[in-house]
Image: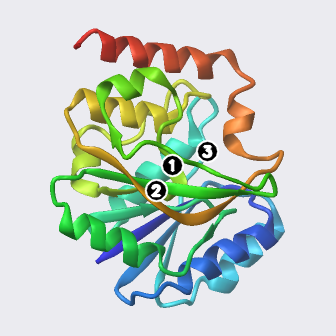
Amino acid sequence: MISILMPVYNTNPNFLKEAIDSCLAQTIENYEIIIVDNASTNRETLKVLAEYSNEDKIKLYNCSREEDKNNISIALNTGLKNCTYDLVARMDSDDVMFHDRLERQVKYMNKNTDVDILGAQMKVFPDNYTTNHPRVITKEKGLESSWFINHPTVVYRRDKILAIGGYKDSPKYAAEDYGLWMNALRNNMNIRNMKDVVLFYRSHGDNLTRHHEKHDSYWESIKIEQQKLRDIL
């Protein structure tokens, strides 16, 4: 029915356990969890992955890190190629899914077969606020802001994402999720957001986006993607 795609790199072991446990506690039965370890060196992270390796629903893959590439993109593309189902739910390794997240999003995607990418809202903690992104994402919305959909809440159709090349793995600090959404919009894909809150997003100093935002190439990649979209409007 649906694959959960979770990249891992030196995740805090307690956060990782909570994330995996929330995936295993879903209200539907027919799903798999594709975990891609991006060459973690933290022994405790690796220990947690080993503890869950015998779970029937979990398939664990490994990919190497490349010095001058966006490594989360490498991990995500590795996972996409190994997902069994066409519906893929993104999940970060330090967040917590609501128990009925998959049930709600699968129901929506089965009912709305024209939707290619579906986001939802998330509750950010410990900051204690909830996102409220627009229901319909148009090309114009893509140019108004670099944050109009929450990557960890997304469900998309695997074949559609692979058809447009998946996640870009360069430059090293690129906004890989924004790049994917903008590429999807350029290819006239249908992007929607549910009003439902489907997960707890853990805000902390090690969030990858916060790390990438410190680099000029992150912001430059956003400008480039916006210009590509403007060029076709």
| Foreground label between 1 and 2 | 2
The amino acid pointed to by label 2 is Ala
Q: Secondary structure at mark 2?
A: strand
Q: Residue 55: x, y in percent?
A: 54, 89
Q: Name the amino acid, label 1.
A: His
**Residue displayed at 63% across by 84% down:** 52
Of label 1 and label 2, which has the lower sequence position?
2
Q: Which mark is residue 65?
A: 3
Mark 2 surroundings: few (<14), some (14-19) or many (≥20) residues within 10 A: many
Horizontal and vertical percent position of residue 26 = 49, 84
Is residue 18 toward the left or the right of residue 6 in the image? right
Coordinates of residue 183 in the picture (x, y in percent): 32, 30
Out of 225 and 139, give the one closest to the viewer.
Answer: 139
Please give the residue where the numbered disc 2 appears in the rendered image.
Answer: 120
Q: Residue at x 42, y 63 (%)?
A: 89
Q: Kindly report the distance in space between the C-alpha atoms of the residues bearing marks 1 and 2.
A: 9 Å
Q: Report which quarter residue 83 is drawn in.
A: bottom left
Corner quadrant of residue 216: top right
Please say if the residues under marks 1 and 2 sit with CB atoms less than 8 Å apart.
no
First in sequence: mark 2 or mark 3?
Answer: 3
Question: Which tag is nearer the camera, tag 1 or tag 3?
Answer: 1
Tell whether 118 sits left or right of 44.
Answer: left
What residue do we see at 39% from left, 90% from top?
A: 29
Task: Name the one closer to the observer, 94 or 36.
Answer: 94
| Label 3 CA crowd tier, 10 Å (few <14, some 14–19, many 20+) | some
SS label for mark 1: helix
